[in-house]
Amino acid sequence: MSIGVAFSIKADLGTSPISSVPYVLSLIVKISVGQLTIAMHCLFVLLQIVILRKKYQLIQLMQIPVAIVFGMMIDFSVYLLRNLQYSSYFVQWIFCLIGIILVAVGVSMEVTANVVTLAGEGLVLAICKVLPVKFSNMKMCFDCVLVVIAALISILMKGELLGIREGTIAAAVFVGLLSKPICLPMTKWMNQWISVKEK
C-alpha cells in the first residue's frame, strides 16, 4: 500500500484519498507525508474507540505500531521512487493506475487477514459494525470524505486546490470498487490453503 501511495504521489494527478489529507498538510506545514499519516491514523484509532466503545477490541490498538511502520514505509517508498519521472499525461495515468491497484490489493489483504488493519480501514470496519453498509461502499464514501476534507484544508490554508486532481477522484471511486472483487477470491484461496495445511 505504501508503494501504491508513492506511485500516486509521483503520478502528480493528485494523491490517493487515504493520503490526501496528510499530503495536502505536508505541502503546508513541511512535515513529511509519512509522519502526518501516522498522526492521522492515531486519530482514526481514537474515533474507532468512540464509535465502538465497549465493543472495541484491544487487539486493534496494534493499529498504532502498524501506522508507524506504514508512515515510515510511505516516506521510504517516496524516496525509492524519487527518480521516477513521467514523460506524458498517459504515463501519469499509468503511475496513477499502478497506485490504485496496489492500494486496492493492500486493502483486500488487510480485510481478508482479519487480524489488524490499518487505522483507516479499521475506522471503515467500525462504521460498518454500527451501520448496515457494505465495506466496499463505505470505503468509497470514506475516501470521498477524506478528499473533501483535504480540498477544504487546501483552499482555506493556501487559497488554491493542491494535491487533489482527477487521479484522486479515480482512486476514491476505484479502490473501494476493486477491493471487493480482489478480496473475495483471495479469501477463498486463503481458506483452501489453510484447510490443506490442516490436513
Image: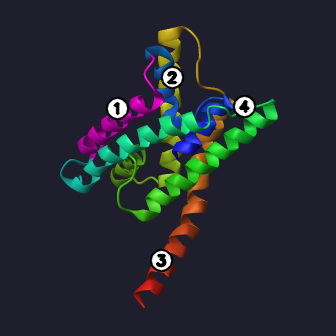
The picture quadrant where one finds residue 16 is top right
Contact flag, marks 4 and 1 (Cβ < 8 Å): no
Instruction: Check disc 2 and give the amino acid type.
Output: Val
Instruction: Check disc 4 and give the amino acid type.
Output: Gln
In the image shown, does 70 or 56 lie closer to the viewer? 70
- Mark 2 or mark 3: whose residue is earlier in sequence: 2
- Can you identify the residue that label 3 sits on? 191
Q: Position of residue 31 (x, y in %)?
A: 43, 21
Left or right? Give the position of 90 relative to 150.
right
Magenta part of the chain: 30-51
Q: What element carries label 1?
A: helix
Residue 120 is at least partly visible in this image: yes
In the image shown, does 3 or 131 lie closer to the viewer? 3
In 3D space, how far apart are the residues under numbered discs 2 and 4 (Cα atoms)? 21 Å
- Residue 39 circle label: 1
- Residue 78 circle label: none
Residue at 58% in and 19% down? 162
Q: What element carries label 4?
A: loop
Instruction: Check disc 3 and give the amino acid type.
Output: Asn
SS majority, magenta: helix
- Residue 24 circle label: 2
Front tag of 4 and 1: 4
The quadrant of the image that shows the C terminus is bottom left
Q: What element carries label 3?
A: helix
Question: Is-magenta flag for residue 49?
Answer: yes
- Can you identify the residue that label 4 sits on? 85
Front tag of 1 and 3: 1
- In this rendering, the answer to whether 93 lies above or below 188 is above
In the image shown, does 56 or 138 lie closer to the viewer? 56
Contact flag, marks 2 and 4 (Cβ < 8 Å): no
Q: Where is residue 183 in the image (x, y as percent from the top left)?
A: 54, 62
